[in-house]
Image (spheres, grey):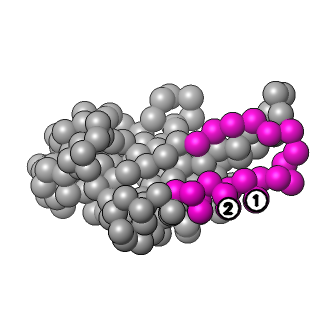
Amino acid sequence: MADKKRGKFAFLTVFERENAGVPPDGNWLKKKKHAKAYASELYGEGLVFVGAWPYAGKGYCYGVYASFDNFLSNTLQLKAGRRYGLEMIRAENGCNLYFDIEGIIQDPTDEEQIRARIIEKIRQRLREKYNAEFGLYITRGSRQTEKGYKLSYHIVVNGLVFSNNHGP
Protein backbone atom coordinates (compact mmCIF):
# COMPACT_ATOMS: atom_id res chain seq x y z
CA MET A 1 0.00 0.00 0.00
CA ALA A 2 1.38 3.42 -0.92
CA ASP A 3 2.55 5.66 1.94
CA LYS A 4 0.58 8.49 0.35
CA LYS A 5 -2.70 6.58 0.81
CA ARG A 6 -1.78 5.59 4.37
CA GLY A 7 -0.95 9.22 5.27
CA LYS A 8 -4.58 10.30 4.77
CA PHE A 9 -5.91 7.95 7.43
CA ALA A 10 -5.28 7.32 11.14
CA PHE A 11 -4.26 3.64 11.34
CA LEU A 12 -3.63 1.75 14.57
CA THR A 13 0.02 1.13 15.33
CA VAL A 14 1.25 -2.41 15.91
CA PHE A 15 1.22 -1.72 19.67
CA GLU A 16 -2.35 -0.37 19.50
CA ARG A 17 -3.49 -3.43 17.51
CA GLU A 18 -2.00 -5.75 20.12
CA ASN A 19 -3.51 -3.71 22.95
CA ALA A 20 -6.96 -3.76 21.32
CA GLY A 21 -6.75 -7.51 20.64
CA VAL A 22 -8.09 -7.15 17.09
CA PRO A 23 -8.02 -10.07 14.66
CA PRO A 24 -4.96 -10.46 12.43
CA ASP A 25 -4.84 -9.17 8.87
CA GLY A 26 -7.18 -6.38 7.84
CA ASN A 27 -6.41 -2.69 8.07
CA TRP A 28 -7.35 -1.18 11.43
CA LEU A 29 -8.20 2.50 11.72
CA LYS A 30 -8.93 4.81 14.64
CA LYS A 31 -11.89 6.66 13.14
CA LYS A 32 -15.12 5.45 11.56
CA LYS A 33 -15.03 8.09 8.82
CA HIS A 34 -11.48 7.02 7.91
CA ALA A 35 -12.52 3.36 7.76
CA LYS A 36 -15.44 4.16 5.45
CA ALA A 37 -13.30 6.31 3.14
CA TYR A 38 -10.39 3.86 3.14
CA ALA A 39 -12.69 0.90 2.42
CA SER A 40 -14.21 2.72 -0.54
CA GLU A 41 -10.80 3.70 -1.94
CA LEU A 42 -9.27 0.27 -1.45
CA TYR A 43 -12.13 -1.98 -2.59
CA GLY A 44 -14.83 0.22 -4.14
CA GLU A 45 -18.17 1.30 -2.75
CA GLY A 46 -20.03 -1.46 -0.92
CA LEU A 47 -17.58 -4.23 -1.83
CA VAL A 48 -15.98 -4.71 1.57
CA PHE A 49 -16.59 -5.58 5.21
CA VAL A 50 -15.88 -3.04 7.95
CA GLY A 51 -15.93 -4.30 11.53
CA ALA A 52 -15.92 -2.29 14.74
CA TRP A 53 -13.98 -3.52 17.76
CA PRO A 54 -14.13 -2.18 21.32
CA TYR A 55 -10.87 -0.42 22.13
CA ALA A 56 -9.72 -0.18 25.76
CA GLY A 57 -12.27 2.35 26.98
CA LYS A 58 -11.56 4.63 24.03
CA GLY A 59 -14.62 3.73 22.01
CA TYR A 60 -14.02 1.63 18.91
CA CYS A 61 -11.45 0.99 16.24
CA TYR A 62 -12.47 -0.15 12.75
CA GLY A 63 -11.09 -3.00 10.65
CA VAL A 64 -11.35 -3.09 6.87
CA TYR A 65 -11.45 -6.58 5.34
CA ALA A 66 -12.04 -7.77 1.78
CA SER A 67 -15.12 -9.72 2.91
CA PHE A 68 -17.06 -10.92 5.94
CA ASP A 69 -15.60 -14.40 5.37
CA ASN A 70 -12.08 -12.93 5.58
CA PHE A 71 -12.95 -11.10 8.81
CA LEU A 72 -14.54 -14.23 10.30
CA SER A 73 -11.64 -16.53 9.42
CA ASN A 74 -9.20 -14.08 11.03
CA THR A 75 -11.41 -13.67 14.10
CA LEU A 76 -11.43 -17.45 14.55
CA GLN A 77 -7.64 -17.31 14.96
CA LEU A 78 -8.16 -15.51 18.29
CA LYS A 79 -8.70 -17.38 21.55
CA ALA A 80 -12.36 -18.22 22.18
CA GLY A 81 -12.84 -15.60 24.89
CA ARG A 82 -11.51 -12.83 22.62
CA ARG A 83 -13.73 -13.40 19.56
CA TYR A 84 -16.10 -10.48 19.42
CA GLY A 85 -16.66 -7.48 17.26
CA LEU A 86 -19.36 -5.52 15.54
CA GLU A 87 -20.20 -5.04 11.92
CA MET A 88 -20.31 -1.42 10.84
CA ILE A 89 -23.36 -1.38 8.58
CA ARG A 90 -23.26 1.55 6.23
CA ALA A 91 -26.76 2.82 5.46
CA GLU A 92 -26.01 3.40 1.79
CA ASN A 93 -24.65 -0.11 1.15
CA GLY A 94 -26.15 -3.55 0.78
CA CYS A 95 -26.72 -5.48 3.97
CA ASN A 96 -27.21 -9.16 4.75
CA LEU A 97 -30.36 -10.05 6.61
CA TYR A 98 -29.46 -10.33 10.28
CA PHE A 99 -31.09 -10.96 13.63
CA ASP A 100 -30.07 -9.58 17.02
CA ILE A 101 -31.76 -11.88 19.54
CA GLU A 102 -31.68 -11.33 23.29
CA GLY A 103 -33.70 -12.54 26.26
CA ILE A 104 -33.46 -13.64 29.87
CA ILE A 105 -34.00 -17.26 30.95
CA GLN A 106 -33.70 -18.67 34.44
CA ASP A 107 -32.08 -22.01 33.58
CA PRO A 108 -28.91 -21.86 31.43
CA THR A 109 -29.27 -25.56 30.59
CA ASP A 110 -32.25 -24.61 28.38
CA GLU A 111 -30.02 -22.54 26.08
CA GLU A 112 -29.11 -25.26 23.57
CA GLN A 113 -32.74 -26.26 23.06
CA ILE A 114 -33.88 -22.64 22.72
CA ARG A 115 -31.10 -21.83 20.23
CA ALA A 116 -31.96 -24.91 18.15
CA ARG A 117 -35.64 -23.85 18.00
CA ILE A 118 -34.71 -20.30 16.99
CA ILE A 119 -32.40 -21.52 14.21
CA GLU A 120 -34.97 -24.01 12.92
CA LYS A 121 -37.69 -21.31 12.81
CA ILE A 122 -35.39 -18.94 10.91
CA ARG A 123 -34.43 -21.66 8.42
CA GLN A 124 -38.07 -22.72 8.00
CA ARG A 125 -39.23 -19.15 7.31
CA LEU A 126 -36.38 -18.53 4.84
CA ARG A 127 -37.32 -21.71 2.93
CA GLU A 128 -40.99 -20.66 2.84
CA LYS A 129 -40.32 -17.08 1.73
CA TYR A 130 -37.33 -17.54 -0.61
CA ASN A 131 -37.52 -21.23 -1.56
CA ALA A 132 -33.80 -21.52 -0.85
CA GLU A 133 -31.32 -22.64 1.79
CA PHE A 134 -28.98 -20.02 3.26
CA GLY A 135 -25.90 -20.35 5.43
CA LEU A 136 -26.16 -18.80 8.88
CA TYR A 137 -23.28 -17.21 10.77
CA ILE A 138 -24.06 -17.28 14.47
CA THR A 139 -22.19 -15.46 17.21
CA ARG A 140 -23.07 -16.10 20.82
CA GLY A 141 -22.67 -13.66 23.68
CA SER A 142 -24.87 -15.42 26.24
CA ARG A 143 -23.88 -14.93 29.86
CA GLN A 144 -25.01 -14.83 33.47
CA THR A 145 -26.32 -11.44 34.64
CA GLU A 146 -27.90 -10.19 37.85
CA LYS A 147 -31.34 -10.54 36.20
CA GLY A 148 -30.79 -14.13 35.13
CA TYR A 149 -29.09 -15.90 32.24
CA LYS A 150 -29.04 -13.61 29.20
CA LEU A 151 -29.34 -15.25 25.79
CA SER A 152 -27.56 -13.20 23.17
CA TYR A 153 -27.19 -14.22 19.53
CA HIS A 154 -26.32 -12.34 16.38
CA ILE A 155 -27.35 -14.33 13.34
CA VAL A 156 -26.31 -13.24 9.84
CA VAL A 157 -27.98 -14.85 6.83
CA ASN A 158 -25.23 -15.37 4.25
CA GLY A 159 -26.30 -14.57 0.70
CA LEU A 160 -29.58 -12.76 1.43
CA VAL A 161 -28.60 -9.17 0.77
CA PHE A 162 -30.92 -6.17 0.79
CA SER A 163 -30.11 -2.92 -0.98
CA ASN A 164 -29.55 -1.20 2.37
CA ASN A 165 -30.00 -1.70 6.12
CA HIS A 166 -33.61 -0.53 6.02
CA GLY A 167 -35.12 -3.45 4.11
CA PRO A 168 -35.64 -4.65 0.53
Which quarter shows the C terminus?
top left
Question: Front-most of 11 and 150?
Answer: 150
As drawn, 100 above or below 75: above
Tag 1: Cα neighbours inside 10 Å, few (<14), some, or many (≥20)? few
Up/down of 60 relative to 86, above or below: above
Residue ID at (75%, 35%): 104
x and y percentages locating residue 20 in the rendered image: 53, 45
Report the residue marked by disc 2.
116
Residue 140, image x and y in percent? 63, 52
Discs 1, 2 touching: Cβ within 8 Å:
yes
Q: CA distance from mark 1 to mark 2?
A: 6 Å
Q: Identify the residue at horizontal 47%, vertical 58% (top origin).
A: 125
Local SS, label 1: helix
Amino acid beneath label 2: Ala
Inspect the image, locate mark 1, and give the three-letter code of the amino acid beneath it: Glu
Q: Residue 96, how many percent across, how many down?
A: 34, 53
**Marker disc for residue 3:** none
Q: Residue at x 28, y 41 (%)?
A: 167
- Asked which quadrant contains residue 1, the reply is bottom left
Q: Which residues are magenta?
A: 101-122
Disc 1 designates what residue? 112
- Residue 19 lies, in percent from the top left, at 55, 45
Q: Is residue 65 left or right of residue 147?
A: left
Crowd tier of the residue under label 2, counting other residues whose Cα lies within 10 Å: few below 14, some 14–19, many 20 or above: few
| Quarter of the image where one finds residue 152 | top right
Local secondary structure at mark 2? helix
